[in-house]
Image (cartoon, rainbow, N blue to C red):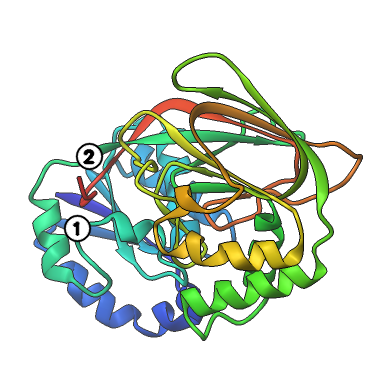
Amino acid sequence: MRAGVVFNPRSAAGRTGRRQARIEEHLESLGLSTILFRPTRCPGDGESQARQLAEVDEVDLIVVVGGDGTLNEVANGVLRSQRPTVPVALVPAGTGGDFARMLTYGKGDWDGLREALGRPPVAIDVMTCRFAGMEEGRLALNVSGIGLAGQIVQCTNRGSKLLGGKLTFLLATFGALVRYRPAPFRLRWTPVDGGERHWEGLLANAFVANGRHCGGGMDMGPGADPTDGALQLVVVPFDNLWSLVRRLPYLYNGRIEQAPGLIVDRVSRIVATPAENLTLPGECDGEAPGDLPVDISFAGRKLQMFGIRQ
């Protein structure tokens, strides 16, 4: 099997780059016939590297060594290439490692990765996030956040990630909460069972989940399944700061549907618009690629991935 490797040396606070030689040895032990290494040089480079590996180098497999952001770039590159069915495998090496929680193997489990490559890839759903001014939109695999989520991601990516995923995101959450000024939002969505629903009010956060985990371990619940053809919408209204703090445990323990005052629905599309003329960052897959408003829907595409737990 001819493989291309998109390698983010800056992931995991730079630890991935320092372990590059060891990672290359492990990859070479997987029995791949040819390995083309492509380290990323700057944000967005993973997309162009993946497209070149698919179209020009004509690889049979693309291995991503990095976190959710690098995986997102590779997915955009593959799915927008002339060979969108090239399968992808992830070597988890990010800060949050949220997408990796859906894999049959963990970080550093090279035997598990080898076993996953011996099984057929799984076709997972993809959503399109069209932020303000975007025509084509950004493809996303895991979770998109509206409201406080964009500011949390900005705080996380500007700061140090040496404390690891869960603590880094938790500290960024509290830091963003202190500075957050809740804005009135209008939300309009299409449930999978048909019709249309609306919500308007002060918003703390809204999550649109294809995958189950985000924010270094937040759990969107069992309704978030990347193979079921539906998105899990979780709306967290803003009542007061204490109510948000009180709801935090539900966001981590998998019982989000039991949290008081939250709206949970299975949807195919959602449009979120700040009710005022505000510039607020949006978020998808742990990055902040654009500002709100945002229109999120199924992309009508599938990404072939190895090792997805079913």
Q: Amino acid at mark 1?
A: Thr
Under circle 2, the secondary element is strand
In this rendering, does residue 49 appear at all? no
Provide residue 104's location: percent of width, then percent of height.
19, 58
Asked whether residue 231 appears in the rendered view, the answer is yes
The residue sitting at the right extreme is: 277
Tell me how many marks there are: 2
Q: Quadrant of residue 288?
A: bottom right
Badge 2: residue crowd in 10 Å (few <14, some 14–19, many ≥20): some
Secondary structure beneath dot 1 equals: loop
Residue 188 rendering spot, x and y as whole percentages: 67, 26
Q: Looking at the image, which residue sits at the far top?
A: 195
Residue at image point 22% right, 43% down:
60
Query: Marks 1/2: CA distance?
Result: 12 Å
In the picture, the quarter occupied by the C terminus is top left
Is 244 in front, or is 120?
A: 244
Q: Quadrant of residue 29?
A: bottom left
Q: Which residue is pictured at 48% across the width and 74% down the height?
A: 166
Which residue is under mark 2? 122
In the rendered structure, which disc, 1 or 2, sits on the residue that comes first in sequence?
Answer: 1
Image point (35%, 40%), residue name: 226
Rendered view: 59 above or below 34: above
Say the numbered circle drawn on residue 298. Answer: none
- Residue 9, percent across and down? 45, 73
Residue beneath disc 1: 104
Query: Left of 194 or right of it: where is 186?
Result: right
